[in-house]
Amino acid sequence: MKVIEAGETLIGKTRYVFGGGRSQSDINAGRFDCSSFVRWAFEQVGVNVGPLSGVTTDTLKTQGQAINPKDMKPGDVVFFDTYKIDGHVGIYVGDNKFLGCQGKTGVAIASMEKGTYFGDKFNGRVKRF
């Protein structure tokens, strides 16, 4: 999917900053959090999921169509219970992996396999925009 291709252009070029990515200067400097990265990636392919300054995991989870995790496809948005319910979000790429902006890596592909950090935090919420 084009949203994955757009997001992959930032791999290795960003750093995670909680609350980052909500101004053009943050974006230009490669400072994102998980939800601002998802917003940015979808914006690149013409999908508006909310205003630059106001997108959070809580606003993203109210949008799109709910998908059963068994039926998720690349480009779907996946949620994780980290510091709170739906505290982290990313874009599913297939093969139990997702593209997101994580604290230790910035934008990167991470595993959702059981027994991994995000695999154990995946809460089954999947949205299709």
Image: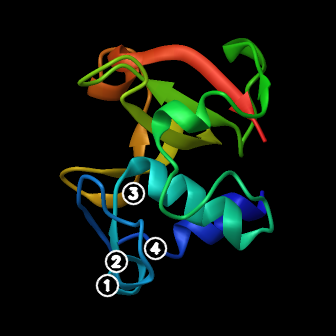
> Does label 4 or label 2 sit earlier along the sequence?
4
**In terms of depth relative to the viewer, which is nearer, 70 or 126?**
126
Q: Dot 1: what SS?
A: helix
**CA–CA distance between discs 3 and 1?**
17 Å
Which residue matches tag 4? Answer: 10
Circle 1 Cα neighbour tier, 10 Å, few/some/many (<14 / 14–19 / ≥20): some
The amino acid marked with disc number 4 is Leu
Amino acid type of the residue that numbered disc 3 sits on in the rendered structure: Ala
Sequence order check: which comes first, mark 4 or mark 3? 4
As measured in the structure, the alpha-carbon distance from the residue carrying label 1 to the one carrying label 2 is 5 Å
Question: Which of the two marks, 3 or 1, is nearer to us in this view?
Answer: 1
SS class, disc 4: loop
Q: Which mark is residue 108?
A: 3
Label 3 residue SS: strand
Q: Check disc 1 and give the amino acid type.
A: Ala
Tell me what residue is drawn at x 65 percent, y 53 percent.
50
User: Which badge, 1 or 4, comes first in the chain's sequence?
Assistant: 4
Give the labeled residue for mark 2: 26
Q: How is the image coloured?
A: rainbow
The residue shown at (48%, 36%) is 57
- State which tag comes first along the sequence, 2 or 3: 2
> Could you tell which of marks 3 and 1 lies nearer the N-terminus?
1
